[in-house]
């Protein structure tokens, strides 16, 4: 006797509840503007609207998958922090939809819902859902490209259309971040192993080519340089200071594996041990399960691409610093792999499945709290200072580093005209002048060769301290639990020297 199929209404209710819960979780752990990169994207979106493609940095203007929707969000809802967060939030929810759609192709609604549920609580996706960076959009467009290819292979109606749409998605992924081209190797490995997709790849290539031609024509019209993406100013900005300043070694190649596997790694909470579940799924069924093999080509290729690309042929430094967010493109195949294992591998062991999900959920919630606190710490002093600066008399100039200046422009928009960077600062000005000195961002100023006055590096005794803002260290979960049991509070110790707002004596004061 055949089992009664699950009613569509129940699936709709489950999907609606899942998306609603994911949205609530992302809003609760709102990240917002943090530091340098998201400020650069903000500037690039402003430059796109004004026609100044160098604004925010020339390389950032080429990342259409983030900058274009960010510019639209600014146009429609205003240049606010929450309006900007709508872009990554929409991408994060779209990724859940794609995970469900791909899961349906691999094993029906149960696999789709399981994959989407895993992504919905995965800390990296929760935190990244309100932070401006290109890796989440990249992951979404790559998942869309994979769905187009997979759907084209399985569809009896309009398969060419699906391949063409997959090519368009891959093209948008490329103009969001150039490492998307590594996905071509994923498709080639699938074809080599399974012998599929060959007939549809010309249509995939057509879609990709259409986006590439559009990209060239766009920059030709706007800048007069057809291949602006590969011009000297753009390529120069790709040179990562973080990678250049890192100590030469060969251990950097294991950096991402440490994040995924080592619980004591500082980045492990972002992933909540999901890669351990992926490895368990491979042990369970890699040899017999074609879906796991296919997904292994996907996440394995992308993981190797970000882990092993060197800065130069010495192989002693990575091409870019290893940040957790660079692993966004492997989250969907991770979730699909674990979902297949949970649904099929535990078909006769629901209690084991419940235990695995409970443990993962606990780790995910703890990891989300940890990552959220760490994220918010960077911009915390600027947020406190913005409220104070808004109360100063009109005409008061506040000088600070470029990163903090951008943050204050957003957080205290009514004082934008009087918030200036250190470059060209006249400390002997006659008007009221304040200096907001953040020691965490001073090395960045010096690294970029920006002129920082000597008095800012070492404030003189005649400067008056107006306020002090500490950047606290995140308290541990064990400390919080002990404090809660004792009815006490946890005092977090500062991470480094405090951020200080100084009042600089003017010429009028010295008369």
Image: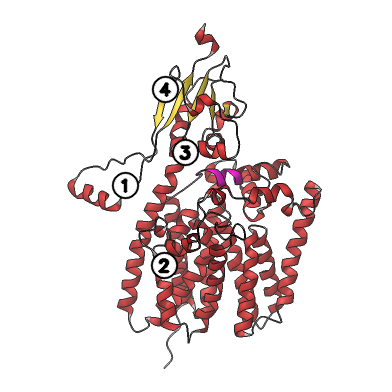
Q: Main secondary structure of the magenta part?
A: helix
Of the numbered discs 2 and 3, the one sitting upstream in the chain is: 2
Between the C-alphas of marks 2 and 3, the distance is 32 Å
Between the C-alphas of marks 3 and 4, the distance is 18 Å
Between the C-alphas of marks 4 and 2, the distance is 47 Å
- Up/down of 165 relative to 34, above or below: below
Between the C-alphas of marks 1 and 3, the distance is 20 Å
Q: Residue at x 34, y 75 (%)?
A: 353
Which structural element holds mark 3?
A: loop
Q: Is the residue marked by circle 2 packed among few (<14), some (14-19), or many (20+) residues within 10 Å?
A: many
Which structural element holds mark 2?
A: helix
- Up/down of 48 relative to 154, above or below: above
Q: Which residues are magenta?
A: 34-41
| Figure quadrant of the N terminus | bottom left
Q: Is residue 483 left or right of residue 155?
A: left
Give the numbered dot on residue 440. Answer: 3
Q: Residue at x 51, y 68 (%)?
A: 332
Q: Quadrant of residue 471?
A: top left
Q: Which residue is mark 1?
A: 475
Give the farthest residue toward the bottom. 1
Of the numbered discs 3 and 4, the one sitting upstream in the chain is: 3
Q: Which residue is mark 4?
A: 465
Q: Residue at x 45, y 16 (%)?
A: 462
Give whichever of 157, 85 is nearer the camera: 85
Give the numbered dot on residue 274. Answer: 2
Between the C-alphas of marks 1 and 4, the distance is 28 Å
- 1 or 3: mark nearer the eye: 3
**Image position, residue 341 (x, y; %):** 42, 78
Which structural element holds mark 4?
A: strand
Of the numbered discs 4 and 2, the one sitting upstream in the chain is: 2
């Amino acid at each position: 006797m055949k089992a009664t199929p699950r009613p569509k209404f129940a699936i709709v209710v489950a999907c609606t509840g899942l998306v609603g819960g994911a949205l609530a979780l992302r809003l609760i752990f709102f990240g917002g503007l943090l530091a340098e990169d998201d400020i650069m994207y903000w500037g690039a979106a402003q430059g796109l609207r004004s026609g100044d493609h160098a604004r925010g940095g020339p390389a950032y203007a080429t990342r259409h998958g983030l900058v274009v929707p960010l510019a639209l969000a600014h146009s429609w809802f205003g240049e606010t922090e929450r309006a900007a967060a709508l872009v990554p939030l929409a991408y994060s929810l779209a990724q859940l939809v794609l995970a469900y759609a791909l899961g349906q192709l691999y094993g029906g609604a149960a696999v789709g819902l399981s994959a989407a549920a895993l992504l919905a609580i995965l800390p990296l996706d929760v935190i990244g859902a309100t932070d401006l960076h290109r890796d989440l959009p990249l992951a979404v467009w790559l998942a869309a490209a994979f769905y187009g290819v997979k759907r084209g292979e399985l569809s009896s109606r309009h398969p060419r259309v699906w391949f063409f749409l997959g090519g368009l998605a891959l093209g948008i992924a490329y103009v969001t971040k150039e490492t998307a081209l590594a996905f071509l190797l994923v498709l080639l490995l699938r074809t080599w192993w399974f012998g599929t997709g060959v007939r549809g790849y010309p249509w995939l290539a057509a879609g990709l080519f259409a986006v590439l031609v559009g990209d060239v024509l766009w920059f030709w019209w706007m800048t007069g340089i057809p291949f602006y993406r590969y011009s000297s100013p753009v390529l120069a900005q790709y040179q990562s200071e973080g990678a250049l300043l890192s100590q030469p070694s060969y251990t950097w190649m294991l950096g991402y594996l440490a994040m995924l596997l080592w619980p004591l790694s500082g980045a492990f909470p972002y992933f909540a041990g999901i890669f351990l579940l992926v490895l368990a799924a491979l042990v369970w069924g890699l040899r017999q399960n074609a879906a796991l093999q296919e997904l292994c080509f996907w996440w394995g290729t992308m993981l190797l691409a970000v882990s092993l690309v060197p800065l130069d042929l010495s192989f002693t430094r990575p091409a870019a610093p290893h940040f957790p967010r660079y692993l966004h493109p492997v989250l969907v195949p991770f979730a699909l792999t674990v979902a297949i294992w949970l649904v099929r591998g535990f078909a006769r062991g629901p209690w084991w499945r419940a235990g695995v999900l409970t443990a993962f959920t606990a780790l995910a919630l703890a990891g989300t709290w940890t990552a959220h606190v760490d994220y918010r710490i960077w911009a915390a002093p600027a947020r406190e200072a913005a409220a104070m600066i808004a109360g100063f008399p009109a005409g008061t100039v506040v000088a600070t580093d470029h990163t903090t200046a951008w943050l204050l422009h957003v957080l205290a928009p009514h004082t934008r005209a009087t918030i200036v960077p250190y470059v060209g600062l006249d400390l002997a000005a006659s008007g009221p002048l304040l200096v907001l000195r953040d020691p965490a961002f001073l090395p960045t100023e010096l690294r970029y060769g920006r002129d920082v006055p000597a008095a800012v590096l070492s404030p003189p005794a005649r400067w008056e301290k107006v306020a002090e803002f500490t950047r606290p260290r995140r308290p541990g979960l064990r400390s919080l639990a002990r404090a809660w049991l004792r009815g006490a509070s946890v005092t977090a110790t500062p991470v480094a020297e405090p951020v200080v707002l100084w009042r600089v004596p003017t010429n009028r004061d010295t008369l």
